[in-house]
């Protein structure tokens, strides 16, 4: 029987029983995370941009994102979801095409933001909803299941407040989105308002002010999915910056002795990937 990776991914989304969507930035990190127990892998637009020597926010093309996603899909046996920014275009038709191409790349789902990168502002609510409606229609026309996540990013960027975010996710819900996401609300009380606004699964980001929030606390709030975003990649970059600073500024190589043994890395890289026999 043909595997429906989208259906497997959907089954992980249980409000109050959140799974961790582990965001990777290359095939190696994806394999390591899967070997360590990640039930699903996510791409990260920021972490991917870092690997290309670029800043986050509209600097990666759709073709680049699809090739990157295909590499992660080929690397692991768990579902992979794409962090696909604004769908790589302003009009609903482009977002719908992004959904179709994502499925062809083997992704189990993608998330779509409401940010117009060229304008540096959110799309008007009506257009944002039309974009999600087109994405949902494209997803439902696929032969397999596909999890479409609608994001209201204006709270995180400072473009709008929680009232507008709630109005947007309610509209995205009505448009057929499978999962709703308001990155970085002011606190747990605001996150609970997001959960209360929909019967659909809600994603929370374990970063920034929520990095110290436990899985149990997210579960108690009714969260279905906890993503890591670019946090792991940024942590890796911090280690590079601090260790290189010691080397270049002080001639101190001591931190290099704390690296993970190569044999341990090899074991993880070959323990949970595809075509490792």
Image (tube, rainbow, N blue to C red):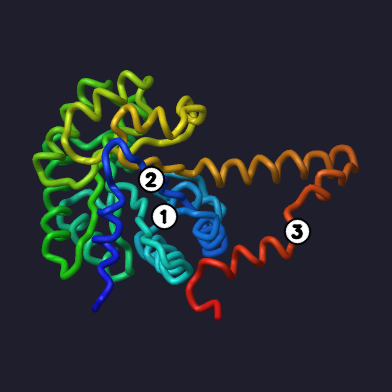
Residue highlighted by disc 1: 39
Query: Callout 1 environment at 10 Å: few (<14), some (14 to 19), or many (20+)?
Result: some
- Residue contact at pointers 2 and 1, CB within 8 angstroms: yes
Q: Residue at x 12, y 60 (%)?
A: 140
Residue 10 or residue 160, whichever sits in front: 10
Residue highlighted by disc 3: 261
Residue highlighted by disc 2: 19
Q: Residue at x 38, y 58 (%)?
A: 61
> Which numbered marker is on residue 101?
none
- Drawn side of residue 190 relative to residue 199, left or right: right
Q: Residue at x 34, y 28 (%)?
A: 220
Location of residue 58 in the rendering, given as x and y in whole percent from the top left corner: 39, 48
The residues tagged by marks 1 and 3 sit, at their Cα atoms, a distance apart of 25 Å
Q: Earlier in the sequence, mark 2 or mark 1?
A: 2
Would you place residue 268 above or below residue 17 in this image? below
The residues tagged by marks 2 and 1 sit, at their Cα atoms, a distance apart of 7 Å
């Amino acid at each position: 029987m043909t595997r429906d990776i989208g259906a497997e991914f959907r089954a992980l989304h249980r409000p109050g029983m959140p799974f961790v969507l582990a965001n990777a930035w290359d095939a190696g990190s994806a394999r390591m995370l899967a070997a360590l127990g990640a039930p699903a892998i996510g791409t990260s637009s920021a972490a991917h941009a870092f690997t290309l020597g670029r800043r986050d926010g509209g600097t990666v093309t759709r073709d680049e994102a699809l090739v990157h996603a295909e590499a992660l899909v080929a690397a692991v046996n768990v579902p992979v979801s794409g962090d696909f920014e604004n769908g790589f275009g302003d009009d609903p038709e482009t977002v719908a095409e992004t959904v179709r191409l994502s499925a062809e790349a083997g992704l189990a789902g993608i998330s779509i933001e409401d940010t117009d990168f060229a304008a540096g502002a959110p799309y008007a609510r009506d257009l944002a909803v039309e974009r999600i409606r087109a994405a949902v229609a494209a997803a439902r026309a696929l032969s397999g299941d596909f999890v479409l996540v609608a994001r209201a990013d204006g709270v995180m960027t400072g473009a709008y407040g929680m009232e507008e975010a709630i109005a947007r996710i309610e509209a995205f819900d009505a448009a057929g989105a499978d999962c709703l996401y308001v990155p970085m609300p002011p606190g747990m009380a605001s996150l609970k308002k997001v959960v209360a606004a929909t019967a659909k699964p809600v994603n929370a980001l374990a970063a920034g002010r929520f990095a110290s929030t436990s899985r149990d606390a997210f579960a108690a709030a009714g969260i279905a999915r906890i993503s890591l975003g670019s946090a792991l990649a940024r942590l890796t970059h911090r280690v590079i910056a601090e260790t290189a600073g010691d080397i270049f500024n002080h001639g101190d190589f001591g931190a290099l002795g704390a690296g993970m043994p190569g044999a341990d890395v090899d074991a993880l890289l070959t323990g949970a990937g595809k075509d490792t026999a």
